[in-house]
Amino acid sequence: MATTDAGLASDAHEQPGHGHSDHGHGDHDHPSYLAHHFDTPEQQFDSGKLGMWLFLVTEVLFFSGMFCAYAIFRAWRPEVFEGCSQFLNTKLGAINTGVLLFSSFTMAWGVRCAQKEQHKLLTVMLATTLSCATVFLGVKAIEYSHKWHLGLLPAGLFSYDPSNPHPVGGPNYLAYICAPFVAITIGVAIWLVVSFLRGAKFQLECAKPLLVVCLCFFVGVGLGTILESGGEEGHHEDDHAVVASTDGTAAEHGKEHAHADGDQHVDHEEPAAAAVASLPAAGAMSNDSADLAVLERLASDATNTGLQDELAARKAQSERSGGGILYDVSDDASATVASAPENVLRPSRAGVFFSIYYCMTGIHAIHILAGIGVLVWLLVRSIRMDFNRNYFGPVDYVGLYWHIVDMIWIYLFPLMYLIR
Amino acid sequence: MSAGSVPSGYEVNDPGYPTPQENYLTNSKGILSWAFTLDHKRIGMMYLIGVTSAFLLGGLLALGIRLHLFAPDGILFNNALFQWLAPDKAPNDIYNQVFTLHGAIMVFLFIIPSVPAALGNFLVPVMLGAKDVAFPRLNLSSFYLWVGGALFFVMALLASGLDTGWTFYTPYSTTTDSSVILATTGAFVLGFSSIFTGLNFIVTINTMRPPGMTWFRMPLFLWATYSTSIIQVLATPVLGITLLLLIAERTLHIGIFDPEYNGDPVTFQHFFWFYSHPAVYIMILPAFGIISELISVHSHKRIFGYRFIAYSSIAIALLSFIVWGHHMFTSGMSPITTIIFSALTFTVSVPSAIKVFNWVATMFKGSISLTTPMVYAIAFIFLFTIGGLTGLHLGTLATDMHLHDTYFVVAHFHYVMVGGTVVAFLGGVFHWWPKMVGKMYSEAGGLLSAALVFIGFNLTFLPQFILGSRGMPRRYATYDPEFAPLHQMSTYGALILGVGLFVALFVLLMSLVNGKKAPANPWGGATLEWNCTSPPPFYNFERPPVVGDPYEFGDIRWDTELDRYVKVEPQRERVPSETPAETPAHASE
């Protein structure tokens, strides 16, 4: 008897959750949603939930590396961060924050619906959450493509030119980003039509909300375009700031301009250009006269040849940068610009901000994409009415994941967009 | 039955041998039944084969290193064969690639998954009394992630090698022509494999314990696995993001780690060691767990200081997160930081020493059987003590300035990683081999392998302490002739070590061919895995096991008639609360 049951058990084992109740050792009355190795639905739910929380811990730690990098580089170069932050469009960031917060709300409502077996409402809630996710990505597509067009790229590729802040031509990045979404939307539309013609009811039910979700991406793109171009209207008034920033002596004016107008013209690139232009020389970062004095004292010991070399190198460097090493040049932007013109707008300095910006928001966007993947899976299952008051674990877990993705954005938004 | 030894009202619990239909190895057939299995025991066996292959590859690379270093100017990579194989590569470049791949393969593909993923997968649910881990499909996917990561490493090896050292330090790793991206992608993928395994074990131990299995009735191997899993879950994501940023640094020049773009290489080192120091404890903690089991079972004596050993595992797991800076004493940190890191480093020695004292105290007045696993366990205590104590030299700021990046460091971590983890792993494999495959191996062969490994290992790495303290830097392809005798001693030792490992492999494989059938409890252990047949049935336990004290050996008796250990326990009717109703299947037997 036991032997035949073991044979059956192997079948059941390959497909947990699909139903064999006889495992040869007594766990009868297993409902179809209960995996064979759990004794009760509660145990299964608790395991899943603990697993999800642990996964979220790893997610937080995954992002913590980038938050650390952000903290380190911002502490070293606060002026670069403040200056470069002005290139980010606060309106778009704020809209995306609102969209994600709303999606968290609908997600939480969805979990409630699953618990209360409100199948229709659950589908609506999941579709709304998904739509918010695609709106978010649509807005992000505008933000990214605009910055790539201007050359606001990671350090190694940074090619922003303040004297020519609106380069003409170049690849149409927006089209590249949108292309896969267009393809997916067309695919879903075809699927919808085919399933309608063939009378496949379940597939039709799935395709309808998914088409709405796809179209929401373009709503996001449209929204982003309107707000981004709304910001561009004021450009010409500020052209003098750009000109000024190319001329070293007037850079200070540009900087003042940036500080004065930054609040009103949050979406303008030009004040930011001036701010980048007025960044201090590299020497200001870590060296000051006290440092050098200590070094000199230590190097006076004849055995300390390494320090003597270091001292010689630093002296040579300070001569090259016109003495900027000996005092804090960040107070005197014009002097810096005049004395070390090769340091101005060195791409690596502004570029590091954009490196961190792209890393953090990019990996966040990848998490949004992953979230869209699992939400679509949930949507299909909810249309299939898989969930009930005893089995709503997956909705709950995905909800947790979705909230952490939102949380990360809620930290990213002020840290990136609101630091000036 | 030797009825005389069984008191009235007690019964002998002897599961006997499994039928082929019950046996997890034979209950379903065909390659697909293995490839898509969700059975933790089969996944554990696949891991075992995988990590052994990685160990073989890494070990051959190590032999290559040692052979090359036989002579001051090198003898292997500059000979005609290698010149013909790789005409465009300088011998020293080949050497750099070989030691890098040795380190990377051993760390990422072998040691980290060795005990937790291979032995842990097999043992955790059985020791716990559960049917499987909490997420069997996640378990299988983490195995395939391991395979994927391994393939990336093989691709890196075949593409243009890797010469950064396993640490991938910037800025060299952003400028070298070797396949850094392939290797870091591999390590990234392996990180997820490790995270999923750890996550699975934490959840399994938290939610899948059967009635009666309280936290302090868990075998110490489970405590060690639990601590390891905490580190895997908390540290590995940081490595993931570090490697991702390194890939971005190489492709996009993001300027976070690369000084050419105003990045900071020391930041990379901080990020890297924030994972990789805890990773050292991912490697050694499960070994501690194995040793706790081995010492207790083969001394036939209750483990001494159970709670201390359990808590010290957790303490090591937590302390492991705040000592990473001791890898960077010479990299440029403020003096106060180095002092703090040095002081914290010393605190790790406290829980480690607690374990060693407890093991020795367990052996004291125990009835020690010098079986192969026990000999490996004793070798572990000896070697780990040397490895641990020399760690204090490196944690001390003043001596570290002298010893940093010398062979002293190499010898230290090999004493911990090989003398510790690998020896414990071998001991564990010998200990649980009868359970895993249902066959007994040749005891004489096992003892021979233990002796060869012990002698070969010490001959390889003891001279390296001397080399390092005399100033021989690590990772050099050539050296001054004055170092030659010690290097040659080391090379001879490596060959003996290699022979010992092959003997171990041979003994284990031969047991499959002509080994005696293993009884359920060959060593007289009291933990739950010895309650089920060898090999275990598909569902581990015919009926839910009665959970008792994992180190109570009083009711384990040697049955002279059956010629094996049996468990004498109260008749089941007397403890109805702990046993649910018997299954019809069982009742009909």
Image (cartoon, rainbow, N blue to C red):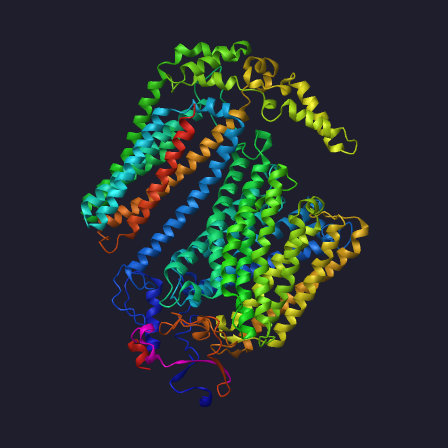
Query: B431 and B306: which one is in front?
Result: B306
Give the percent coordinates (x, y) of residue B293: 52, 68
Q: Quadrant of residue A43?
A: bottom left
Residue B577 in magenta stretch: yes
Give the percent coordinates (x, y) of residue A187: 29, 40
Residue B359 in magenta stretch: no
Quarter of the picture containing the C terminus of chain A is top left
**Taking the image as drawn, is residue B60 in sight?**
no
In the figure, A400 relative to A336: above or below? below
Q: Residue at x 33, y 31 (%)?
A: A96
Left or right position of B368 against A351? right
Q: Quadrant of residue A308?
A: top right
Q: Quadrant of residue A218?
A: top left
Query: B566 and B363: which one is in front?
Result: B363
Magenta residues?
B563-581
Q: Residue at x 56, y 37 (%)?
A: B267
Left or right position of B542 against A208? right
Give the percent coordinates (x, y) of residue A183: 33, 36
Query: B114 and A208: which one is in front?
Result: B114
Q: Residue at x 44, y 15 (%)?
A: A258
**Taking the image as drawn, is residue A98 in sight?**
yes
In the figure, A235 relative to A146: above or below? above
Left or right position of A323 against B297? right
Q: Residue at x 63, y 66 (%)?
A: B379
Q: How many labels were placed on the picture?
A: 0
Quarter of the picture containing the N terminus of chain A is bottom left
Query: A207 and B494: which one is in front?
Result: B494
Q: Residue furthest right?
A: B482
Give the percent coordinates (x, y) of residue A343: 58, 20
In the figure, B449 relative to B559: above or below? above
